[in-house]
Image (spheres, helix red, strand yellow):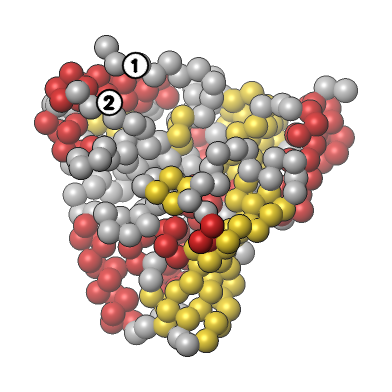
Amino acid sequence: MQWSSVLEREFGAVFHRNEELGAYTTWKVGGAAEFFCCPKEEKLLASILKVRSKQEFPLWIFGGGSNVLIPDEGLEGLVLCTRGLDSVLFEEKGNGYVECVLGAGVSLSHWLGESCRKELSGSEFLTGIPGTIGGALMGNAGSRERYIGELVQWVETVEPDGERVRHEGKEIVWAYRFCGLSDSLRVISRCGMLLRKSDRETIRRNFLHYANLRRGQPHNVRTAGCVFKNPPGEFAGKLLDRAGCKGMRCGDAVVSVRHANFIENRGNARAADIVTLVEECRRRVYRACGILLEPEVRFLGDEWGFLEKD
């Protein structure tokens, strides 16, 4: 039986056909998903992955859509959006510490707001970072000073065969924009983060400090966050600026004049426009200083054809 028929037979109304994906991303570009699902329970997620392990249809996964680009022609197979896994619990641990048990689909901004209201400190360095807990974990999101992996007590994943597994935070490999759980089609479902009790004024000062670090980034525009990772000992934005990338344009996609490591959708940009700018930015920086920038944004789809050194 064809995989699409199996999905419809097993799960019925939880799937949507030809769902436009641009609305689910911060760039607001991209085509439709052949099949789309936003599960609200780990059990359903596990059942879907179990079926997929036998049928082997194309599978794409994202959460808040803040660091992904969807191709204009859309995506074949199944797109899983994890933002439906949005539970938030706070558990007292003693000695002034509280564990936050968070679903992968919880937005960082929502978690920070809830933590502030409960006067919990330790996560303020994530101020201004878009997206969800799951995506932040997969990319080990953070600031120049700290990364989210430092807070993790444990992470639960649904493995490609549908099995649910708990990973202790200290056993996971964390590095700059890297998490050791991101090497397969496993899906993060929830995690435990440890914060400490503090006072509202201290938390407010911390928020202001980290907001100030990001004051040079564009706000209230359609971007996907930083496009490129920082090379060792360098800042991608400064390299792009020196290479003359600010203000470059392709269609309605524009390299931000505020911060060169951001590409803005100024109207009706296409994914192809954004990719053209990404490739030209990499080319210019490589020709200027011999560094080939590595994208931080995830480009979903099979054939993007990124340039190699030329």
Res 260 quadrant in image = top left
Depicted 32 relative to depicted 220: above or below: above
Residue 292 marker: 2
Labels 2 and 1 touching (C-beta < 8 A)? yes
Question: Residue 52's spot in the image, x, y percent?
Answer: 75, 34
Of the pair 274 and 157, the residue shown nearer to us: 157
Looking at the image, residue 130 lies above or below residue 96: above
Per the image, label 2 sits on a secondary structure element best described as loop
Going by the picture, which residue comes out furthest to the top?
310
Identify residue type, mark 2: Leu
**Between discs 2 and 1, the one toward the N terminus:** 2
Q: Which residue is mark 1?
A: 308
Tell me the crowding category of disc 2: few under 14, some 14 to 19, or many 20 or more residues within 10 angstroms, Cα based. Answer: some
Q: Regarding mark 1 in the picture, which secondary structure is present there?
A: loop
Q: For this view, does 62 lie left or right of residue 256?
A: right
Regarding residue 240, the answer to whether it shows in the image is yes
The residue closer to the viewer here, 233 or 229, is 233
Q: Horizontal and vertical percent for residue 189?
A: 63, 54
Residue 279 position within the rendered picture, expressed as x and y whole percent measured from the top left: 31, 20
Residue shown at the point (69%, 54%) measured from the top left: 165
- The 10 Å Cα crowd at callout 1, few under 14, some 14 to 19, many 20 or more, is few
From mark 2 to mark 1, how far is it between C-alphas? 8 Å
Instruction: State the image coordinates of residue 11 (x, y, percent, origin top left).
Output: 82, 41
